[in-house]
Image (cartoon, helix red, strand yellow):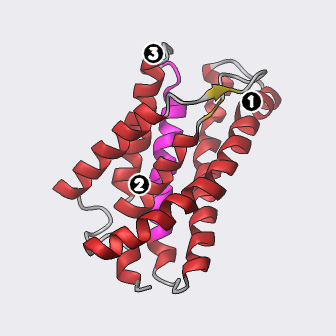
Amino acid sequence: MSTDSALPRTPMWEISSRVVVFAAVGAALYAVLGLISFTIPGTQNVDVRPAFALVPFFGMRFGPIAGFFTGLVGNIVIDQIKGYGALTYWNWSLANALTGLLAGILFAVIASRIQKEGLRLVAVGVIAWVATFLAFLSTITDMWVQGLTLEAWAAVAFGPLLLSNTLVALILVPALDAVWEPISKRIGR
């Protein structure tokens, strides 16, 4: 595998038409597929959402800006459609956005050093999990927004979300990347 196929061809922070298109496609896919989810009983509206895999994936493959937009706009649209309101859980939408951003940055820094396919897929899963963990720490603002204690936030919000998104990060993100890799080589990305 050449490292060129793993990295975006445009500079990481460039906003090009390619980045805008992939960001819009990512947000639309996440918004539509994110509706296929179910709420974990006993939690603070925490969903198991397999489509969340799209957020770190778009960040890794199309850059941190595309990942940020995919997570932010996709989650806002999902919340709006589900009736929560676009900004009721603004901090969770921001955490989704930060996941895409961090995944894109970490992937760009680490991917250039990985040559073996299997190792790259393991790194993709680890990067997705680390980005998710760090980004969703920002939902600690629920202590002020929702009036939760630290223990309640950890037990009914952060903990269940981390559990469900760990499965997504470690299984679905590498699977998406494994499917995308041959396509990216074929189209020269």
For mark 3, give the secondary structure: loop
Q: From which residue to which does the magenta span run?
A: 88-107
| Residue lying at 54% horizontally and 30% vertically, measured from the top left | 36
Please state if 50 lies on the left or on the right of 188 as rendered. Answer: right
Mark 2 and mark 1 lie on one chain; the one further toward the N terminus is: 2
User: Residue 167 placed where, x, y %?
Assistant: 69, 49
Please say whether residue 138 is visible from this viewpoint: yes
| Residue lying at 43% horizontally and 39% vertically, measured from the top left | 30
For mark 2, give the secondary structure: helix
Q: Amino acid at mark 2?
A: Phe
Q: Residue furthest left?
A: 17
Residue tagged by mark 2?
Answer: 58
Residue tagged by mark 1?
Answer: 153
Q: Nearer the viewer, residue 112 or 48?
A: 48
Assess whether mark 1 and mark 2 are in contact (beta carbons under 8 angstroms). Answer: no
Q: Amino acid at mark 1?
A: Trp
| Picture quadrant of residue 116 | bottom right
Q: Nearer the viewer, residue 162 or 151?
A: 162
Report the disc number at residue 85. Answer: 3
For mark 1, give the secondary structure: helix
Q: Amino acid at mark 3?
A: Gly
